[in-house]
Image: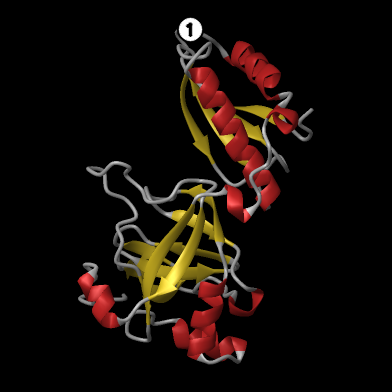
Amino acid sequence: MLENLNIHIAGENALIIYFGEQDGSQVSANISAKVQQAEQLIRKAMAQSLAPDIIDLVPSYASLMVMFNMMTTDYHQIRNQLRTLLQSIDHHLKEQVNHDEANIVELPVYYSNESGPDLSVIAQRAQLTVEQVIELHQAQEYRVYAIGFAPGFAYLGEVDERISAPRLGTPRMKVPKGAVAIADRQTAIYPRVSPGGWNIIGLCPIDMFNAKATPTMPVNVGDRVKFIAISKDEFFTLGGTLEVSYE
């Protein structure tokens, strides 16, 4: 039986399933794997018995939002269906927490002071060289815990504690597309130009979201990401640009 399963109303046609703490703040590879397993199990049921009732699923760190069709079902009915479906999740699906069981996506990064204005700041705070910060950032395989606040913005964890960095006291008004950044023990790539308060350490030339492509994003929740350092020339060859400003 799946323990710590809490289902709550999240709107007139939505409910949210928590797999850890009720506020969804508990983060771990184990809980993320449960979220992924539940999404897979529900999507499989959507192709069968739940096809007319569930509209969409939105996974996050420790929760899964379920949008349902009010014309065919209601909160109480869908909640009971989900409880029945997810009772055997621990037994039915093997937890995908091992590296070998996850899809690994390699993403190139041009690390430098010109592409990463906060790289030296992180190095100084950690009493490391810039080269050591780059090496530590590449050394990890990062799990995709959630995707938001913008399409393609993947929250990845966890960075080495030595290069963990708090969010900027004053967020930048303009962060360039492709900026690779760190906030606390998370890292991410900005999919488009936007405001942001994360510490920028490099640039990635790969589109993190393209509505016209299939698939639209190179990563999904549950995947693992490995960053690979590239030279400036390789960055340009892959379509990157340094015509950016950090405001």
State the image coordinates of residue 171 (x, y, percent, origin top left).
43, 70
Residue 14 visible, this angle: no
Residue 189 horizontal side relative to residue 64, left or right: left
Vertical placement of residue 38 versus 161, above or below: above
Vertical placement of residue 135 versus 212, above or below: below
Q: Which residue has dot 1 on it? A: 72
How many marks are shown on the rendered structure?
1
Query: Would you call the spot at circle 1 few (<14 residues within 10 Å), some (14-19), or many (20 or more)?
Result: few
Q: Residue at x 34, y 55 (%)?
A: 208
Which quadrant would residue 213 be assigned to in this image? top left
Residue 204 visible, this angle: yes
Question: What amino acid type should be assigned to the residue bearing mark 1?
Answer: Thr
State the image coordinates of residue 8 (x, y, percent, origin top left).
65, 28
Give SS at disc 1.
loop
Residue 104 horizontal side relative to residue 215, left or right: right
Q: Residue at x 58, y 90 (%)?
A: 128
Quadrant (top left, top right, bottom left, bottom right) of the C terminus: bottom left
Q: Residue at x 53, y 11 (%)?
A: 49
Which quadrant would residue 117 be assigned to in this image? bottom left
Quadrant (top left, top right, bottom left, bottom right) of the N terminus: top right
State the image coordinates of residue 169 (x, y, percent, origin top left).
50, 74
Vertical placement of residue 77 versus 218, above or below: above
Name of the residue lying farthest toward the front = 100
State the image coordinates of residue 56 (x, y, percent, origin top left).
45, 27
Q: How is the image coloured?
A: secondary structure
